Amino acid sequence: MDKDKVLAEVNGKKITGVDYNLFIDSLNPQLKQYFGGEELNKDVVNELVYQALLYEDAMEKGMDKEDEFIQVVEKTKESMLKTYALGKLLATAEVKDEDIKRFYEDNKDAFKQAESADASHILVEEEDKAREIYEKIKNGGDFEELAKEFSTCPSKEKGGDLGTFTRGQMVKEFEDAVFENEVGTITEPVKTQFGYHIIKINKKNPARELSFDEVKDKIVEQVRRQKEQEIYNKKITELKDKYEVKMNI
């Protein structure tokens, strides 16, 4: 919205694009998405007019002179100033390339991608039924179609596809069958606490160390937070020496 555009006037005071934009920015993400956009939203303009009317009425009644309001203003000002001061302080945090690279080298163990696999399965309650389905697959039956027809797992809607997972995310018997067999294998029925699984191993990814470029953005945020905490702690220590603090707890 053009900040200089005059959208309405209340008692001679203009409501402009600045007011409109500030109102939109104050909304939560869902409402912002609903009311925002390139087109002017008349409901927003109406709301700004209603608020302006309330303001005029409050000023006429001298509410701005009431002690309770003055206290609210002071507390609000104090809170805003704290937030502003903290923002200015943390903005001094500087993340250099050498900081990022040093963090990566010092924490390489944290940037390892675990071994993973991609698998599909058909889950049934009875072993006899599982073996019957397994025989159909051996004789040329389509795994995905059989999963959609017989599997009791919600993954049946995707032909039994479970997506990618790492060790520790599945029950042991299922996990062992996946990670101990080759890609392309369709296992005989595997018993777990959930029933009997016929598992198709679609893909396996070995454990590997993530490259610097893959994790750089994540490291930048981690280093920035670390530096911000250091700056904050240092500043608080300085201010404790400068101002008297009394604790009553």
Image (tube, helix red, strand yellow):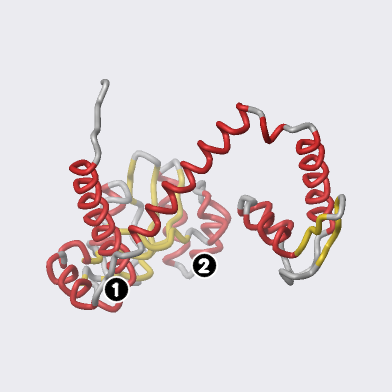
The foreground one among 77 and 230 is: 77
Question: From the image, which quarter does the N terminus lie in?
Answer: bottom right
Direction from residue 139 to residue 72 in the image, left or right? right
Q: Earlier in the sequence, mark 2 or mark 1?
A: 2
The foreground one among 169 and 227 is: 227
Position in image of residue 221 (x %, y %): 32, 64
Q: Please tell me whether mark 2 sits on a helix, a strand or a loop.
A: loop
Direction from residue 89 to residue 104 in the image, left or right? left
Q: How many marks?
A: 2
Which residue is pictured at 36% across the width and 63% down the height?
91
Neighbour tally class for label 1: few under 14, some 14-19, many 20 plus, Cα within 10 Å: some
The foreground one among 208 and 20 is: 20
Q: Give the alpha-carbon distance from disc 2 to disc 1, as whole Å.
A: 43 Å
* Residue 236 in the image: above or below residue 63: below
Q: Residue furthest left?
A: 106
Position in image of residue 125 (x %, y %): 45, 41
Position in image of residue 37 (x %, y %): 72, 66
Q: Residue furthest top?
A: 249
Label of residue 35 in the image: none
Which residue is pictured at 74% across the width and 57% down the height?
35
Which residue is pictured at 22% across the width and 68% down the height?
207
Q: Amino acid at mark 1?
A: Lys
* Residue 247 in the image: above or below residue 226: above
- Quadrant for residue 104, please give it: bottom left
Q: Which residue is denoted by mark 2 in the rendering?
A: 142
State which mark lies toward you, 2 or 1.
Answer: 1
Q: Which residue is denoted by mark 1 in the rendering?
A: 216
The foreground one among 226 and 90 is: 90
